[in-house]
Image: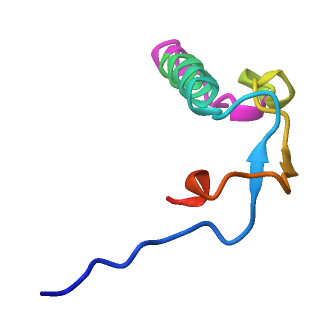
Amino acid sequence: MKNMSRSYKKHPYRGACADSEKEDKRRANRDFRRNVKDALHHGKEIMPLLCEVSDEYNFAKDGKYYDEDFEKKKMRK
């Protein structure tokens, strides 16, 4: 019987201020898609850019930092 291997994070980095940017990215892409559809509907030739719709500095997560006291249990993927 084979044992399954366990994967671990190699370095204990974690996000600052938030765990994920998932909701922020979803909101930004929804706004972007809505603006593109609106531009197509009105016959505009120049489409909006993602950076015009959302600002990454307004996202909840504020970079990453090295955490030396990271628990061994949280190092598992």
Against 41, residue 25 (above or below) is below
Against 31, residue 26 (above or below) is below
Q: Residue at x 57, y 24 (%)?
A: 23
Q: Residue at x 76, y 25 (%)?
A: 59
Q: Residue at x 61, y 31 (%)?
A: 25
In the rendered view, does 70 fall on the left or right side of 20? right
Q: Is residue 49 visible?
A: no
Against 35, residue 3 (above or below) is below
Q: Indicate the quadrant containing the N terminus: top left, top right, bottom left or bottom right.
A: bottom left
**Seen from this angle, which residue lies furthest left?**
1
In the rendered view, does 47 fall on the left or right side of 2? right
Task: Depth check: give the residue in front, 53 or 38.
Answer: 53
Provide residue 16's location: percent of width, then percent of height: 82, 36
Q: How many marks?
A: 0
Q: Residue at x 75, y 24 (%)?
A: 60
Q: Which residues are magenta?
A: 38-51
Residue 45, magenta (yes or no): yes
